[in-house]
Image (cartoon, rainbow, N blue to C red):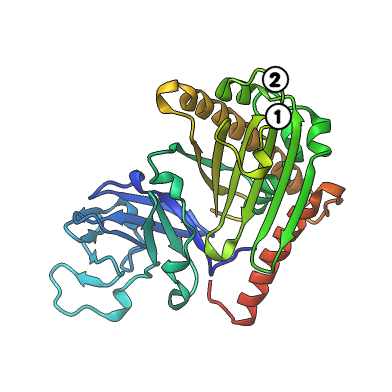
Amino acid sequence: MFIYNAWYVAAFAADIEPGQTLGRRYLNKAVVLFRTEDGEIAALEDRCSHRAMPLSAGHVEGNILRCCYHGVEFDGRGTCTRIPNQTRIPASANVRHYPVVEKDHLIWIWMGEPALADPSVIVDSPEHNDPAWTWRPYTFPVKSNWQLIIDNIMDLTHVPYIHARTIGGNPEQHYNADTKVEFDGRRVTLLRKMPNSIPPKSYVDAGGFKGRVDRWQEVRFEPGIGMTCRVNAGGCDAGTGAYEGRRDNGFMLANNHFITPETETTSHYLWTICTTAPKESGVPATLFDQFFDTITEDEETLEAQQRRIDDEPGRPFVGIASDGAVNQARRLLSIMQEAEEGGKVAA
């Protein structure tokens, strides 16, 4: 199952310098991203119309992409602009163009009906531009279905088990957390409070806590404005007003998870970890390293799941009490897919 009419993160802006190409597969479609020498980003199907050579192996010159096989040239809209030693260019020589937007150091791509692509709705990632925040980007190729990644983020009761050595904490505190799931038809929100908690190792290292803390975790998933799960988390000394909005005595995290299907069983998992901890304190570097370990643990878990799912693809999952946000997220994606099928969206 793929959702075509949605914005996905294709790459980080820094991944593609002027004059470079990047070939990737999104929603099982081969795509070439390239940046013109003027700095503009374009995305085309990664197949020359002449003899099916991958255009990602081609060369950028000025504002065109030249196929490395016979020199056929294309502009950023997929229009064939030149065929060597030939004046007439048939319309069939053009290749598919995908809408792309560069925003907040991210390159977003729209794989569905181009006329429905509205760049104005794309979710903001303000931490990437705010000097009060320090952040680091990562790209993980994960051998699992993309919905498993969303499931993993929307059910944080796995944290004390999979991440016992990093951000985990006490399992009972996680399962007994004050948890609220909200769904309004467009967005799923998971809100969790863990007052008077023993801080996990990463929190002690990053926040310097000496005693118990009030922790919070807030996850928002609104695929209509971008296939991403935005996680706001952090901790303050217990009883100092974290749940009333007074959080400047602790530290805050923004963990942005950008989930882009590659195939039915592989995914591009791009994410950023952001913190308000002062850079000069050394805390961000420590925190970023620990979260790299944390997401690596997730990657190993997701790939292990996918291997067992591949053994028996039709075998259903058994639900448990903590699945509330996961079920609503899956419900929302099903609604979007049904809407596309009703509109006969071309893949």
Residue 149 appears in the rendering: no
Q: Which kind of residue does numbered mark 1 sit on?
A: Ala
Q: Position of residue 97 (x, y in %)?
A: 37, 69
Q: Helix, strand or loop at disc 2?
A: loop
Q: Indicate which disc, 1 or 2, sits on the residue closer to the N terminus.
A: 2
Q: Is residue 129 left or right of residue 258?
A: left
Q: Which residue is mark 1?
A: 238
Q: Helix, strand or loop at disc 1?
A: loop
**Residue under the point 68% across and 22% down:** 165
**Whole-number angstrom distance, CA of label 1 to CA of label 2:** 8 Å
158 up-or-down from 326: above or below: above
Nearest the viewer among 346 and 115 is 115
20 up-or-down from 177: above or below: below
Q: State which quadrant residue 10 falls in.
A: bottom left
Q: State which quadrant residue 82 falls in.
A: bottom left
Q: Is residue 32 left or right of residue 215?
A: left
**Residue under the point 64% across and 70% down:** 336
Q: Decide: marks 1, 2 in contact (CB < 8 A)? A: yes
For label 1, count other residues whose C-alpha is less than 10 Å away and answer few (under 14), some (14-19) or many (20+).
Answer: some
156 up-or-down from 287: above or below: below
Q: Which kind of residue does numbered mark 2 sit on?
A: Gly
Q: Position of residue 137 (x, y in %)?
A: 45, 39
Nearest the viewer among 202 and 89 is 202
Q: Which residue is mark 2?
A: 211
Nearest the viewer among 113 and 282 is 282
Q: Position of residue 53 (x, y in %)?
A: 34, 58
For label 2, count other residues whose C-alpha is less than 10 Å away and answer few (under 14), some (14-19) or many (20+).
Answer: few
Q: Position of residue 149 (x, y in %)?
A: 64, 47
**Residue under the point 26% across and 58% down:** 40
**Residue under the point 83% across and 51% down:** 317
